[in-house]
Each structure stands twice: as structure tokens, then as C-alpha cells.
Amino acid sequence: MLVARDGARLERFAAELTRQYGVEVETLPADLADVDGCATVEHRVAEQHVDLLVNNAGIGGQGAFWEQPAERIDQMLQLNVRAVMRLTHAALGPMVERGQGDIINVSSVAGFVPSGRTATYGASKAWVTSFSEALGSELTDTGVHVSALCPGFTHTEFHDRAHIDMDRLPGWLWLQSDAVVSAGLRDHRAGRTVSVPGLQYKVVVAAVKLVPRSLLRMATRQTRRRIG
């Protein structure tokens, strides 16, 4: 079952999946940042026998926190945090009752690094990672596994939709979406709670845990100036 706002695009993608893989695909157009839209998906998730839930929807933005419209910030939190919480809650009860199930919450390396001009986005992803880790502990011995997939910069439509110019970002920092998906599924199946694809980002996350927070903030400010 695929969920997104653009119904026509969903149908095209569903037809492509059916043609390539011979699978039945259900589409459900809904805006997960909208309370009613999210509720529609919640009900469907709770009613269906969902073996794997992937919370991938999310939006970003760039700019000083106080200069951004409050409505935009609220929309980001509704989608990046509230929708993840509500859909996970809807899926978990039936999964625990059956004694099996999997949930992958797509987070970000940004959740580990306090970066200026993306304050709300980074905080929302820090919540997703922490939430997933806490659930992983709660779900021990239930047969249900929750993990957080934390990629770095990945070639998708994400930055274009957020109107973020990434032309100055060095090529070695980019990840390919297929590789990110493969790494996330591999780590999830191996029982890991947090998956960080790409050696470069594994090094970043490991370093973040060792560097004093004041130096980390200084480093992120300098990096932000270089890439815009």
C-alpha cells in the first residue's frame, strides 16, 4: 500500500511496480501533515494485516528559525513527528498481538548534528531516532522490530521540494537512494535499531559522539557557510 498526496502519481507508480514485479499495489492518496488525512491512513493501517510499515514521508526547510512562517514549521512537525508517532501506534498493537512485524522509520544524520538554519528539521529527526531506539527496547522479546534509518545527503527530490540549493555540496557526500534502501533493510533484518548508510556518515556519527558539543556547533557553522 502506497501513501502520498498526489493520487495520479501514486497510480502511475503502482502500475509500474505491478508491471515490473507482478505484485498487487493499493494506493491511498492522503496528506499525512493533515490531521484528517493522517487519521484515514491510521484506520487503514490498524485494519490491515501490515507486516512492514515504512514511515518515509517527511519535509525539510532551510533558513533562520525566526524568519520561517510558523505554519511551515508546524507542518514539518506534523509530518516528521506526529505522523510517524500516529502510524507507528496504529500498527504496533496488531503486530504485538500477532507476535511479529517490522517498522522502519526514516530519520536522518541531521538528527545527530545541531546545524543552524535547519533547527526544526534536525530536531524532528532526532526525535524519530530516539523514539525508534526507545521502542526497540520496549519491544524486546515481542517478535516486533523497530529501526531508524539515518541517511545523509541522498539523491532524491527532497532538496528540490524544500527549495534548498545543493549545488555546492561535494560529490563524495552524496548517497544513492537504492544503496540507502538496501543498507536500511539489511541492518533492520540483522536486528540493528539504528542504520547509518555510507562509510562517510558512519564516521560522522561516530565522531559526533566524541567531539564536545561546542566544537561540533562550530564545525557545522563552518560547513554550512561553505555549502550555502
Image: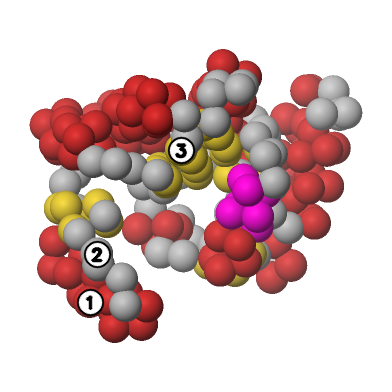
Depth order, front residue of 19/211: 19
Residue at left 16%, top 52%? 28
Q: Which residue is mark 3?
A: 101
The earlier-in-sequence mark between 2 and 3 is 2
Indicate which label's residue lies in the foreground, 1 or 3.
3
Binning the other alpha carbons within 10 Å of mark 1 as few (below 14), some (14 to 19) or many (20 upward) gives some
Q: Residue furthest top?
A: 138
Residue at left 69%, top 46%? 190
- Residue type indicated by callout 1: Ala
Where is residue 228 shown, x and y percent of the image? 58, 54
Residue at left 88%, top 28%? 210
Corner quadrant of residue 69: top left
Q: Which residue is mark 1?
A: 15
- Residue type indicated by callout 2: Val
Q: Which residue is mark 2?
A: 25
Residue at left 78%, top 48%? 202
Magenta portion: prevailing SS class: helix
Depth order, front residue of 55/154: 55
> Helix, strand, or loop for circle 2?
loop
